[in-house]
Amino acid sequence: MSFNDFEEKHPLVSLGFSWGFMGHWPTDLVNNAKAGAVTGWDWLTHPFIDAPSIGSMFLTMCDTSRTTPFTIQQWFGGIPTQYYDETSYHDFNLLYSGSNDFTLWIPLKITSISPSAALPGETVSILGAGFGSTKDKIFFGSASATDISLWTDGRIETKVPDNLPDGEVLVFVEVGCRRSNSVPFTVGIDLLSLLRTCDYLGFEIQAPHVFTSGAPDFEIFDRVFVPLVWDGANFTFDQIFGFSITSLSGSVSSDGHFLSMEWTFYNEERYGNEIVSYRTNESASVRNLPFTSYRVIFGSPYIEYLVTGADAAQYVQTLYFNDYQYDYDGNMTAYNQYVSTNWQAPGETIELECWFTRY
């Protein structure tokens, strides 16, 4: 007979009597049965011998109250696998073939939660095993998660339930009548401490800008600053490279939830000792940009401050850009300057984004 439960893909085939020759199983039996393991006696047995062995096997290997399931090898190691029949003068051997690690169920277990801290409404990934393919229940303490976007046997993605107070809770998964282990999870995050581990800041504005002489042929208001230097809730970056000078200063609120910063960039392009070919000045400042998300990417924190649409304009204090071009005689040949930004342009992607991570 075949027994297959708990999402196991390869059944265990148990045969009260199965042919063998000198105690060896045909090598194609497992393959033909498409089984994870095949077990049975090497000679015709009496029911009073066979029935208890099958009953013991299923009761033991299907015991989901255990932390980990019994393997077929473990079960064989704990029972008599041979008896002698005085009537037929035969030794009867209970044999199995297939994987030593074959089990009838997969342990329901959480191995990790990423990130290990998040705010209510943010998405977290729960990794583990034995979740099955049908959505069931996830608990953050006593609160049940209701917004589950992904459920597979080894991964669940869900939003942290709303209205949870800050602090540590135990997360566990229930599948049917089974319950996983519990893993600590922090609701709310010590954002300032996480920020201070970051040495990389990205700044970007996506919006249609207006210039006196058309858009320049390179990105503006799009900068990366690394490495940052932190002092409490304040951070700075200064760099001189050739004829380029970049300077940044900024701060976050004491809880890390609001960001203010300003930066300047100056660049000259020269050819040997000749006169300047072109000169660029660029700067931007933002105030009280709100924290929006935190996640872990390749083991590093990724902390984002993002505003989209026309609302982005209220956080921008200044934007400045001009670009002068000169000929080799020092005469200015072209000039381009930033004029304005159309924050309400229909059909356009408008984003103001700053993000911190660890380089």
Image: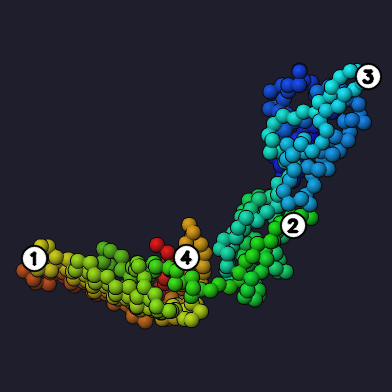
Q: Position of residue 156 (x, y in %)?
A: 63, 56
Q: Amino acid at mark 2?
A: Arg
Q: Which of pointers 3 and 2 lies earlier in the amino acid sequence?
A: 3
Q: Position of residue 166 (x, y in %)?
A: 62, 75
Q: CA distance from mark 2 to mark 1?
A: 74 Å
Q: CA distance from mark 4 to mark 2?
A: 32 Å
Residue ID for mark 3? 87
Q: Is residue 350 visible?
A: no
Residue ID for mark 2? 179
Q: Position of residue 190 (x, y in %)?
A: 53, 74
Q: Which of pointers 4 and 1 lies earlier in the amino acid sequence?
A: 1
Instruction: Please tell me how crowded label 2 is: few (under 14), some (14-19), or many (20+) other residues with Cα within 10 Å.
Output: some
Identify which residue, 342 or 238, lies in the foreground. Answer: 238
Picture quarter with the C terminus: bottom left
Quarter of the image where one finds residue 238: bottom left
Q: Amino acid at mark 4?
A: Tyr
Identify which residue, 309 or 84, lies in the foreground. Answer: 84
The reply to whether the C-beta atoms of the residues labelled 4 and 1 are less than 8 Å apart is no
Which SS class for mark 3?
Answer: loop
The reply to whether the C-beta atoms of the residues labelled 4 and 2 are less than 8 Å apart is no
Q: Amino acid at mark 3?
A: Thr
Q: Residue at x 26, y 63 (%)?
A: 217
Residue ID for mark 4? 302
Instruction: Please tell me how crowded label 3 is: few (under 14), some (14-19), or many (20+) other residues with Cα within 10 Å.
Output: few
Q: Amino acid at mark 1?
A: Asn
Q: Position of residue 46 (x, y in %)?
A: 91, 26
